[in-house]
């Protein structure tokens, strides 16, 4: 398998330097198609392959059986926009000031992605790939940050961070469904619309390598589902989420069926993950993890993660090394045949050698997180979480995945070392180019404070916080 991977990369690199008109396609190793399937606010334990007993995900579970399940995989942020910025650039997004949710405003000095960073779409495009972005963008709404200007030949989706799953009569520019800037009038359910588009684009590009980034807004609020699916789950305690998840699974199944019908599935590299942990307001389940979307506990950034490439990687495996969404960029560009020196500016690594047993070390000895007042570091089994003007907590995840036992007072040397590593990493970052609304920053701070003290979270929005403060006084 190791020699096959090396030969494949050599052939792909050679192919990328001459046109198909001067070659015999039958004698060349074709570049793999690459698909990133990104979900929104999905719960860690809300898939069959992750142990769910009440949500049905047969097609996603089949993808997991055909691929590798990563049991210690993380995104770079616990909220939507910065997490997507890290995935799309292969770099910690704080390096270019993209730290908070939203995408800034005109006074911030930069809107969305920094102009100097090269997106995964741009890299794949430069190597001869047709590039397609579907669904939620949330990386900037100005002209310079439109997907068509950031490496995607086709954009069929919407710019905002959320929207109705059903047609809007007069949507704003950021919430309208569009195709390359032009509004699309649609009928039906957004998850189906995006799933149908994914199938259509596969059919249109079946003869040449393509990179598809399909970013579903499911299962983010609002909790909209199709009537027939709500009827199917009418007695389910999480009726809306179960119905939305079923629809999502159906559409991922349609995409895989099309790849199989066109004999493309074997040489298609597929990544599947959520942009962050599940949210409290969509009834998602974190299983054994503490925390949710928006904080630095495992429930905020540890995500279900599958990598499938049947032609190269044996399915039915689990991989336990520390892994990041940063690795999607590096893995994709190397699989596409680009030279390894293209990885020098990245924070991610190519995962394929680890899966083939060519590399015995872990993909990452250390990972970092920061969002405004909150920061964290994971090194080996130990994780330190710090909250400005409050303090730090230290956990050993090997024995305490639920982050319930603070070891700070017992492991002072370990804590000091992690604090120094975190401080050194933060010294390399830009200051955030924009902040969140003060009310939301206050909510986030108080939620984190209570979690660090092992107290129940009683609120998750500004209105609840104000009501709680009045009752507390």
Image (cartoon, rainbow, N blue to C red):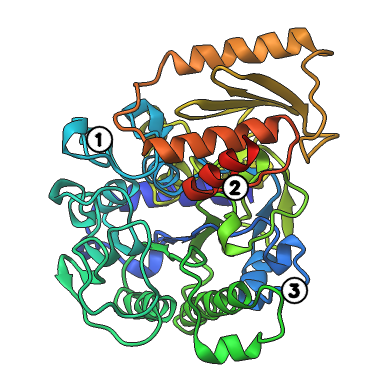
Of the numbered discs 2 and 3, the one sitting upstream in the chain is: 3
Q: How many angstroms separate mark 1 from mark 2 (CA)?
A: 34 Å
**Camera-nearest label, 3 or 1:** 3
Q: Which residue is mark 3?
A: 54
Q: Which residue is mark 1?
A: 114
Q: How many angstroms separate mark 3 from mark 1 (CA)?
A: 42 Å
| Mark 1 surroundings: few (<14), some (14-19) or many (≥20) residues within 10 A | some
Q: To which quarter of the image does residue 172 belong? A: bottom left
Q: Up-down: is 217 above or below 242?
A: above
Residue 89 location in percent, x, y? Answer: 36, 40
Marks 3 and 1 in Cβ contact (< 8 Å): no
Q: Which residue is mark 2?
A: 459
**Camera-nearest label, 2 or 3:** 2
Residue 85 location in percent, x, y? Answer: 38, 42
Frontmost residue, 415 versus 30: 415
**Camera-nearest label, 1 or 2:** 2
Numbered disc 3: secondary structure: loop
| Mark 2 surroundings: few (<14), some (14-19) or many (≥20) residues within 10 A | some
């Amino acid at each position: 398998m190791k020699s096959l991977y090396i030969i494949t990369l050599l052939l792909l690199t050679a192919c990328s330097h001459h046109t198909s008109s001067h070659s015999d396609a039958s004698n060349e190793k074709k570049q793999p198609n690459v698909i990133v399937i990104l979900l929104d606010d999905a719960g860690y334990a809300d898939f069959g392959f992750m142990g769910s007993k009440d949500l049905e995900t047969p097609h996603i579970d089949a993808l997991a059986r055909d691929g590798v399940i990563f049991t210690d995989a993380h995104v770079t942020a616990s909220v939507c926009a910065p997490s997507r910025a890290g995935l799309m650039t292969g770099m910690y997004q704080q390096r270019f000031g993209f730290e908070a949710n939203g995408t800034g405003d005109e006074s911030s000095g930069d809107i969305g992605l920094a102009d100097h960073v090269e997106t995964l779409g741009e890299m794949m495009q430069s190597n001869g790939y047709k590039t397609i972005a579907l669904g939620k963008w949330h990386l900037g709404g100005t002209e310079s940050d439109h997907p068509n200007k950031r490496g995607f030949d086709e954009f069929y989706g919407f710019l905002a961070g959320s929207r109705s799953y059903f047609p809007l009569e007069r949507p704003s520019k950021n919430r309208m469904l569009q195709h390359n800037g032009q509004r699309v009038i649609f009928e039906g359910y957004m998850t189906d619309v995006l799933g149908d588009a994914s199938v259509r684009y596969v059919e249109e590009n079946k003869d040449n390598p393509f990179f598809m980034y399909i970013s579903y807004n499911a299962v983010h609020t609002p909790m909209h589902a199709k009537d027939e699916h709500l009827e199917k789950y009418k007695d389910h305690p999480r009726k809306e989420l179960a119905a939305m998840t079923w629809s999502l699974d159906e559409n991922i199944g349609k995409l895989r069926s099309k790849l199989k019908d066109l004999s493309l599935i074997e040489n298609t590299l597929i990544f599947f993950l959520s942009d962050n942990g599940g949210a409290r307001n969509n009834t998602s389940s974190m299983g054994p993890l503490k925390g949710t979307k928006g904080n630095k506990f495992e429930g905020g950034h540890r995500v279900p993660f599958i990598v499938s490439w049947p032609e190269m990687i044996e399915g039915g495996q689990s991989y336990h090394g520390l892994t990041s969404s940063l690795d999607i960029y590096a893995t994709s560009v190397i699989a596409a045949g680009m030279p390894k020196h293209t990885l020098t500016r990245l924070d991610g690594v190519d995962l394929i050698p680890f899966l083939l047993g060519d590399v015995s070390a872990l993909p990452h000895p250390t990972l970092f997180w920061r969002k405004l007042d909150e920061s964290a570091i994971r090194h080996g089994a130990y994780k330190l979480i710090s909250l400005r003007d409050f303090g730090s907590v230290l956990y050993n995840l090997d024995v305490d995945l639920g982050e319930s036992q603070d070891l700070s007072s017992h492991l002072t040397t370990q804590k000091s070392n992690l604090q120094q590593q975190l401080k050194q990493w933060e010294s390399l970052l830009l200051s955030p180019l924009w902040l969140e609304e003060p009310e939301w920053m206050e909510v986030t701070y108080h939620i984190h404070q209570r979690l660090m003290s092992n107290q129940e979270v009683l609120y998750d929005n500004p209105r609840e916080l104000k009501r709680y403060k009045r009752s507390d006084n």
